[in-house]
Each structure stands twice: as C-alpha cells, then as structure tokens.
Image: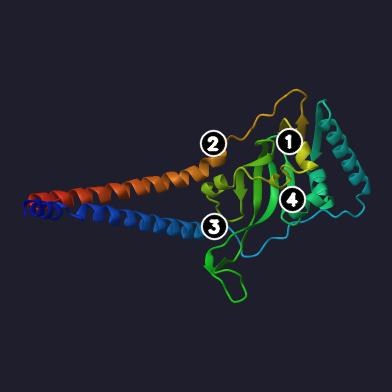
Amino acid sequence: MEIEKTVTREVGQKSPFAGCAILIAALAVMLFLIGFSVTALFRQFNEIAKFTDERPKVVDVVSLDEKETGLNRLAEKLETFRLAADSEDSASMELSAEEMNLAIAAYEPFKDLRGMFRVKEISPESIRFEISFQLNGKPRMSKEGEGGIVASDPRYLNAELVAEPGLLQREVVLQVRDIRVPGKKVPWEFKEQMSPYRIAERYVGKEGIGTTMAKLTAVELGDGFVRFEKKAGVVAKDTVTDAQVDRASRRLFTVLGIVASVFLLVAGVVIFIGLRLKKKRGEPV
C-alpha cells in the first residue's frame, strides 16, 4: 500500500504544463516563421512589380547583313586568343562593344542573350548594357491548362545595367553597380541580390568557351573595350569574394534568426511566468 501511495503521489506531482508549453511555443514559432516568410515574399514581389513590366522590351540584335569583314576579323581574333590560351604562353584579347554585340548575334552559344542583352557602352569604369530580363512574378493558383498547383505571371526587368566584369572561381561574372529604370527607383537590396550576375554560368565546364574562360587570369576594362588576359605562370585570383556572393542571402537568414530568437525569448518568458505562478499557488511544476 505504501509503494502504491508513493507512485500515485509522484505521478500526481508531475505536471504536463512545461512540456505542453514548450510544444506550443515551438509550434507557434514555426507558424510565425512560415507566416513571416510568406508575408516577406509577397512584399518582395509587390516591390519588384513597381519597377518591372508585364511585357518585355525589344532589345535590338545586330544585323549580320554586310558584316562579313567584321565577322571574319572577329573570328580570327577569337581563334588566335583561344590557341594562345591553350598553349603555355601568355595571351591577351580586346573586344569592343560592337564586336561583343556581333558575337552575340552570330555565334550559337550566345543565342540565349539575343533580344535580352546588348552592350551599349564600355568605359574604364564600367560596362552599360541594355537588358530585358524575365523574372518570376507573384505566385498564384494555376489556371486551367497550366501544370502544377501554383503558377505565376512573369515580370520583365527592362533597364540599363551598369556593371564591372570580374572573375569568380574561373568564371566571368558581372559585378552590378547600378540598375536604371527610367522614371522608377530600383531598391539597392534588389541590386545586391543580382550581384554578381553570372552571365557565363552556362559555359562553365564545357568545351570551347568554358575551357578558355577557365584559363583567364584577368578581365579588365579599357576606354571602349574589355581586355581578357591569360598570363603564363599566374594563378587566377577571384575579384569577387564569396562574402559578396552570399551577402544578400546571409542578410535574410540573419533577419529570420533575429525574429526567431526574439519570439523564442518571449515564449520562454511566458513559460517562466506560468511556472512561477503555479509555484506560488502551491501547484506542482
């Protein structure tokens, strides 16, 4: 009988309040973070809609008519640089805005850039591009005939992109300095999110452009041209750091972490107050 009374007393003294409170707090934090993330996502889409359009802008593609001389000169320049880069010697090549636009119009590997990307001007400080980039629009329920449950209507960034070329892990990237949309303001957070823009990502690890690009040791700007260099015996150094690449995403996780920490602190205080009240009332905790 004595053993039975002891067991009954111990069971009666154990309160599920603390465990339930912790579970409720964890569920509340999860629901709060989900709600916060969804709200932030839709707010981001609303901000993007302010400086983007529903339709793409027509970006001119260079006509190849009567460009045979220029095409031959460009092909010779590219091949000479490729052969020199494949050897043990140093190599250098300068391309003007006209030559870069001609390459986009003429060569198959650049076909995806046609109608959405054109070099406007090159200066020692930056390159200016005319762009029409397709972006994901605000999520919505799929309409009849659309695959999946959730879909979206695309938005288009019709703007002037101001950038500086650089190297990141043997890949040519663009460090975005500015995005200019006439009559509209582009938030700096969006500019940071786009930088570095991996314009050459599709060529990484592939024969041809990818092979030559991996041997570059420098990409520099001049007065009206971009210089691509491969210096013998020099190991390429990234001009864009991992910190710059991850800066925007780190900021988002930092915000989420702070919000979660504050919410957990509040939940902990509530649990602590509840336990103190139970103790004052003489109830088991």
Residue extending farthest to the top is 233
Looking at the image, the residue that sits furthest to the front is 1
| Picture quadrant where residue 241 is located | top right
Residue at (79% x, 50% y) in the render? 109
Spatial separation of the CA atoms under disc 1 and disc 3: 34 Å
Q: Position of residue 196 (x, y in %)?
A: 61, 42
* C-alpha separation, residue under disc 1 versus residue under disc 4: 24 Å
- CA–CA distance between discs 3 and 2? 24 Å
Q: Left of 270 or right of it: where is 50?
A: right
| Mark number displayed over residue 214 | 1
- Give how far across and how far down residue 16 sits, in percent: 20, 55
Q: Residue at x 81, y 26 (%)?
A: 90
Give the residue number, with chain letter if any, for mark 2: 243
Mark 2 or mark 4, which has the lower sequence index?
Answer: 4
Q: Is residue 15 visible?
A: yes
Front disc: 1 or 3: 1
Q: Which residue appears farthest toward the bottom when viewing the image?
A: 144
- State which tag comes first along the sequence, 3 or 4: 3
Residue plotted at (88% across, 35% down): 80
Q: What amino acid is found at the position of numbered circle 1 in the picture?
A: Ala
Type of amino acid at the residue the image marks with label 4: Arg
Q: Nearer the viewer, residue 82 or 280?
A: 280
Give the residue pinned by disc 4.
118
**Which comes before the other along the chain, label 2 or label 1?**
1
Q: Tell me if label 1 and label 3 are in contact, CB under 8 Å.
A: no
Q: Which residue is mark 3?
A: 48
Q: Residue 246 vs residue 198: left or right? A: left
